[in-house]
Amino acid sequence: MTTVARITYFLSNLENKPGALLRVMQDLKAKNIALAGLWGVETQEKAGKLYVVPENPDELKNAWESAGLLTGEGTGFFITGENRTGVLNESLDALANAGVNIDAIDAIAVGGQFGSYIWVDAADIEKAARALRTM
């Protein structure tokens, strides 16, 4: 059995240099802002992009807007459940059958459980939500 939750993520641009991520994380800790997910990637411009899924979206949004760090916001899905071979295929099948293309995905398994964040085009959010809830 899997569980699907709609999530809000936020995007920030970072300098691609040592300590840039640490400073952001220290600020979040000082403001007691908890995270459910975090991804950082280097862009072609040799800058960094930081994607964050906070436990409380309003807290992070307010903090990053005040600090001038917020460069984007979007909606995705977090799928969790017992890890077993092919479990993610159920979600991928539901999205494919609904005609929803995946923009980005990540997945991890730890301690017998799996978790996967899936991002789709903003125009397909409701279609994806319906598909994932009918798996």
Image (cartoon, grey):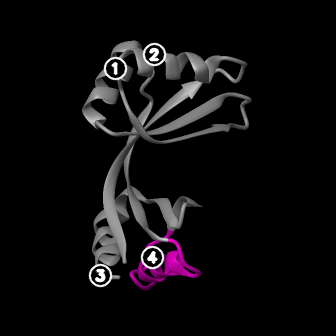
Q: Amino acid at mark 4?
A: Ser
Q: Residue visible at 42% across and 26% down?
A: 70
Gap between marks 2 and 4 measured at Cα: 35 Å
Figure quadrant of residue 9: top left
> Regarding mark 2 in the picture, which secondary structure is present there?
helix
Q: Quadrant of the C terminus?
A: bottom left
Label 3 or label 2, whichever comes before in sequence order: 2
Gap between marks 3 and 1 measured at Cα: 36 Å
State the residue position of label 1. 63
> Regarding mark 4 in the picture, which secondary structure is present there?
helix
Label 1 or label 4, whichever comes before in sequence order: 1
Q: Residue visible at 47% across and 81% down?
A: 96
Q: Residue visible at 43% across and 73% down?
A: 100
Badge 3 crowding class, 10 Å Cα cut-off, few under 14, some 14 to 19, many 20 or more, is few
Q: Amino acid at mark 1?
A: Ala
Gap between marks 3 and 2 measured at Cα: 39 Å
Q: Could you say where residue 109 lies in the image, as x and y percent from the top left?
A: 57, 62
> Regarding mark 1 in the picture, which secondary structure is present there?
helix
Gap between marks 3 and 4 measured at Cα: 9 Å
Residue 56 horizontal side relative to residue 16, left or right:
left
Q: Are marks 1 and 2 in contact (CB under 8 Å)?
A: yes
- Residue 100 belongs to the span the image colors magenta: yes
Q: Which residues are magenta?
A: 83-101
Q: Could you say where residue 50 lies in the image, as x and y percent from the top left?
A: 55, 34
Q: Amino acid at mark 3?
A: Thr
Q: Amino acid at mark 2?
A: Asp
Tell me the tag on residue 134.
3
Q: Could you say where residue 128 lies in the image, as x and y percent from the top left?
A: 35, 70
State the residue position of label 4. 91
